[in-house]
Amino acid sequence: MDNKNNEILLEARDLCKYFPARDFFGRKKAEVKAVDHINLAIRKGETFGLVGESGCGKSTLGRTLIRMYDPTSGSILFKDQDITGLKGKQLLPVHKQMQIIFQDPYSSLDPHHNVREILKESLTAVSGLSTDEMDGRMEEILKKVGLKPDDMYKYAYEFSGGQRQRIGIARALLVEPEFLLCDEPISALDVSIQAQVVNLLEDLQKEMGLTYLFVAHDLSMVRHISTRIGVMYLGRLVEIADSDELYENPLHPYTKALLSAIPLADPRLAAQSKRVMLSGELPSPMNVPAGCHFHTRCMYAREECKNRIPEMMEVSPNHFVACPYAGENNS
Amino acid sequence: MKKETKNKDKSIRIDSVKLALKHDKAAVISLIFLSIIILFALLAPFLPMEPNATDIANRLKEPSLTHWFGTDEVGRDYFARVIYGGRVSLIVAFLAMLTSLTIGVAAGTIAGLTGGIVDMILMRIVDILHSIPWMVLVTVVSIFLKPGIQSIILVIGLFTWMEIARLVRAETLSLKEREFILYAGFSGVSKWKIIISHIIPSVFPTIIVAATTSMADAIMTESSLSFLGVGIQQPMSSWGSLLQNAQGTMQNSFHMALIPGLLIIITIFAFNKLGNLLRVYVEPKVMSGEKE
Amino acid sequence: MEETLKKKDKILSAADIRTTFHTHGRTVQAVRGVSLYVESGEILAVVGESGSGKSVLMKSVMGLMPDNAEVKADELTFAGQDMLAMDPEQLRKMRGKEMAMIFQDPMTALNPLKTIGSHLMEVLKRHRGMDKEAARKEAVAVLNQVGIPSPEKRLGQYPHEFSGGMRQRVLIAMALCCRPKLLIADEPTTALDVTIQAQILDLLKSLQEETGMSIILITHDLGVVASLSHRIAVMYGGLLMEEGTTEEIFYSPKHPYTRALLHAVPKPRSGGKERLEPIPGMAPSLINPPSGCPFAERCKFACEDCRKEIPQFRTYSETQRALCIYSGEELDHKEGEVESHG
């Protein structure tokens, strides 16, 4: 990128996060390459959707980006500032601007604390607030997420799953962040409640000018909420495009298979759609195939795919694919 | 609203305990027994009796209306001695339990939350202490310390915290992965505060149950030490030392050995029963077994 | 007795099933009078959110409820046999042989210490009286049928050596061993990734076509059933809210809850960008269920009468009926009014 783009809020350059896998004697046996040389730029005000199957590293990528996890190598830039090397207390101002909401509304809230204590905790790093100011801010944010100020003195178990997720959102937004990592925020909720939470997230984004990284495996919800989408497979990004472009014109063979597997809530449409079935099983993340990670299950795989790691290429404006044969496979 | 839900939760717990009590007569008796013993121990100084008053004229008397449990070899009222002995046994056990609980919880949470080298060192200490037959260890250490109530509390406390530390560490390890702890760290909450405000409340049920078992163990250890003569020293007495004294007069007054012996056994049994009941209270699932 | 819709070849027919639990002195009314039928050779989807009673209903039919549950029914007929008249021994035999059930988490149904082969062969020996050699051959054939590659080798492996999708296939294979007339699948794909989910759903569909058995698919996801089921039963708050063919449910839903459910997910046709219409509030408690329609609290059309008593079914076609005091047309009209008033 030669022209300086002020729009970019968060950027990953060649980012890696490996987890050591140890054997019985505690020796390092192998590495799980959860995030493997990822390049990614998230623009201010957008919702970037990150999809992929379980174990593809999408949550790890998100958590590494907000520096909840320490990256193994590569760099992370937030508002043009390199935050890769920050440690301990240095991270607090960064965490104030990048927040997270979790998947499980049960394990993300301490059952022994009431809402006020839960919310107060995220203000730990914000100094110089009097108790009254804190309470004021908490009341305001509770109203914003659709809860009542009286709810402050209730405990998490007194709320339903959807309401707990609202508390989680309130906790994240209390410090007025610019960036919010939504780590599968609706997967644990009932269908009728999912829409409540998604609409709330959309409203809050408009109101507060937030940027979202929306990690999910429900592909129709991701399309609904995202402006751009990245598809991950075994630690690598295989395709990035605007959300409509990705769904209408998927280029990577894995994206095609993934999208065609979405169960469509429309029987006639479902009957028309052709499924691209994947053969074989997802390889173990401890022992990923060489070359293109996807070649073991790809119906277009060639000899070269086994050796060469495919580069991300921009095939049309804003549409990136990590498959050199993406264009040819369409025919 | 808040009260209601909390009360409902509480009533489920109380219901489970009631159910457990209904099926377990021994538990009911244990609770009554413990209440009486503790009451006597607390009220002993206000009762009209004197455990150390000797009466050479009335030595080794059989139980009678004036001396319910008879008198000992220097004519002291054995009932009063048993009550005061129980007071000492319970105080020693309680303070030893507190000591061992404090060390165990601190070591367990710090090891679990910090991980790495701290965890390794703490857990190796636990392993080492565990691998030495503790009765031998405790006896040897007590010989070197000045005998007395403080040393015995300290000795029991210092060498019985390992099991609690292991339990608490295991729970801390699984809690550490929970997202509310992850988030607390992310928000800049200090490790110390995470332990105090998140981990200890979550492991509290385990701590409570461990406390009752630890109490029972401490009574046993104190009695054994006193029986061996390295525990409570004259003129103070505990159930263990009473048992030891009774050795000399076994042939004539068997009841002098029988009474403290039985009290030790029943009290230990009762504390274990109490532990079971508390487990039902803190985890109602243990009894009811099914979910909705 | 409830008016039944269509007298055809029914494999399962149940009238007014009521299941209650007693825990901690409280009564949970999980299923509050549900009548439903399954035709032979059809896939019926039972759709509902958590707490709707869909799983409890099927477990009640299968006799899998714990001791603290009480199951009552006016009629329960399976393949022409009156299950209410059978003694427990007969029931157990029939349920073991002619009905089979698979669950969301296959690991809980498999013994981690036994090989896949011994799981399968045990069922074959017990229910079909095969000897070891025949059972082995049949086990290989069944594994082949559910699409497990190199079944000979896989027979000697343990459950932990299988992925989630493969385990679900093993479970389906175990169910097929008895050649059941009815297979009940309780959220079989909820724990699986979307590509594996598609594989399992395809497998269920092709097995149904091959063997002619009936399948009841319990799920919370309307998308999963759209391409698979013949008919759909929608449950909420322990009651059957609407039933109809898949076409009827998706393209002319009558019950406000069914409609709301369809509006709460992104619509695949339009690219899914329009704003979602969430259903406000939350599901009712089954401990003290409301005396009226359980959906009334969240329904934008609800009136006073809805809260008084549970409405009667309205029949719309041979196959479709809905539990609402308003007819589909009345609701269409009301919907127009709501929108024009803003």
Image (cartoon, coloured by chain):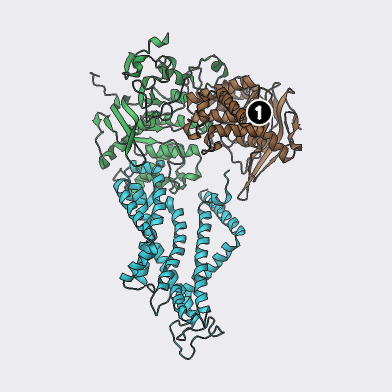
Q: Look at 47% across and 47% down and name the residue there.
A: A154
Quadrant location of residue C4? Answer: top right
Q: Which residue lies under the disc numbered 1? A: C180
Quadrant location of residue A125? Answer: top left
Q: Quadrant of the C terminus of chain A?
A: top left
What is the letter of the cyan chain?
A: B
Q: Chain of mark 1?
A: C
Q: Look at 60% across and 56% down and name the residue there.
A: B19
- What colour denotes chain C? brown
Amino acid marked by disc 1: Pro
Q: Look at 45% across and 23% down and name the residue there.
A: A224
Depth check, front residue: A103 or A331: A331
Image location (x, y in percent) of residue C270: 49, 17
Image location (x, y in percent) of residue A100: 37, 35
Left or right of B200, for residue C213 = right
Element assignment for label 1: loop
Image location (x, y in percent) of residue C299: 59, 32
Depth check, front residue: C112 or B263: C112
Q: Is residue A178 above or below residue B267?
A: above
Left or right of C80, for residue A112 = left
Q: Residue lying farthest bottom?
A: B57
What is the letter of the green chain?
A: A
Image location (x, y in percent) of residue B274: 52, 61
- Callout 1 environment at 10 Å: few (<14), some (14 to 19), or many (20+)? many
